[in-house]
Image: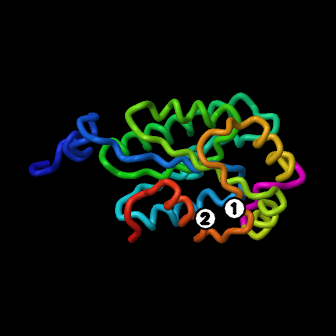
């Protein structure tokens, strides 16, 4: 179509690595820790930012989706791995174009270090681990419409214990048990010195 930008033009001047990439903030924690809420609030506090939610990528598998579980099926592991790779790819792409990125998902255990490696060395990655107490997570989950914990899967206490035991202590681990979502978003922004608040 006449006048339409090419793919390279649409991607922006930094898309090929010619400029300084924007930072990527990786927000993780167990389900119910507040990742989606904090990620959205943090993005809204920045003048320019992109929020990429792992759950959005999970729902892109419309037919044949297999969820992760305490004893995951091979297909669940395949889909989870694809989700993380695409999350990293999108984060790199937007960051290369100069957009600060907030990428959030349940990235637990060895997967956290692997995900940071997927981001590569062309972006500055900040890892933020939301780690409220398990009983706080359970209460928050009970107040939601769609529950992450039930009788036929993980319990908040068991997943939290495994998460703390198996996840590398990289980045900033925040016990947000006594904070509101807004307070946590402000804490993260100040901690990482993420530009000016709108």
Does 142 sit left or right of 118 as displayed?
right
Could you tell me which residue is drawn at 44 percent across and 31 percent down?
A: 120
Q: Is residue 5 above or below residue 15?
A: below
The residue that mark 2 highlights is 184
Task: From the top left corner, tell me how far across and down residue 129 is, in percent.
Answer: 64, 49
Stretch in magenta: 145-152
Task: From the top left corner, tell me how far across and down residue 58 is, in percent.
Answer: 59, 46
The residue that mark 1 highlights is 176
Tag 2's secondary structure?
helix
Task: From the top left corner, tell me how far across and down residue 112 is, in percent.
Answer: 62, 37
Q: Quadrant of residue 150?
A: bottom right
> Can you see residue 54?
no
Does 65 sit left or right of 91 as displayed?
right
Q: Is residue 74 magenta?
A: no
Q: CA distance from mark 1 to mark 2?
A: 7 Å
Proximity of marks 1 and 2: CB atoms separated by less than 8 Å: yes
Does 113 sit left or right of 76 as displayed?
left
Q: Is residue 20 above or below residue 35?
A: above
Q: Quadrant of residue 96?
A: top left
Please state which of residues 19 and 30 is positioned toward the viewer in this rendering: 19
Could you tell me which residue is drawn at 79 percent across and 38 percent down?
A: 165
Does 96 sit left or right of 104 as displayed?
left
């Amino acid at each position: 179509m006449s006048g339409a930008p090419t793919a390279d033009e649409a991607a922006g001047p930094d898309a090929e690595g010619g400029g300084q990439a924007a930072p990527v903030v990786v927000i993780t924690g167990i389900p119910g820790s507040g990742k989606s809420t904090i990620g959205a609030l943090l993005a809204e506090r920045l003048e320019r930012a992109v929020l990429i939610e792992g759950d959005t990528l999970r729902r892109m598998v419309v037919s044949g989706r297999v969820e992760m579980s305490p004893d995951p099926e091979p297909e669940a592991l395949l889909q989870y791995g694809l989700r993380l790779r695409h999350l990293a790819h999108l984060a790199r792409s937007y960051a290369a174009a100069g957009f600060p990125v907030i990428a959030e998902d349940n990235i637990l255990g060895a997967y956290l270090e692997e995900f940071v490696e997927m981001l590569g060395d062309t972006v500055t990655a900040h890892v933020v681990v939301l780690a409220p107490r398990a009983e706080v997570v359970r209460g928050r989950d009970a107040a939601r419409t769609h529950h992450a914990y039930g009788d036929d899967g993980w319990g908040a206490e068991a997943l939290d214990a495994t998460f703390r035991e198996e996840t590398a202590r990289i980045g900033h681990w925040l016990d947000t048990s006594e904070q509101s979502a807004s307070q946590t978003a402000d804490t993260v922004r100040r901690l990482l010195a993420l530009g000016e608040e709108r």
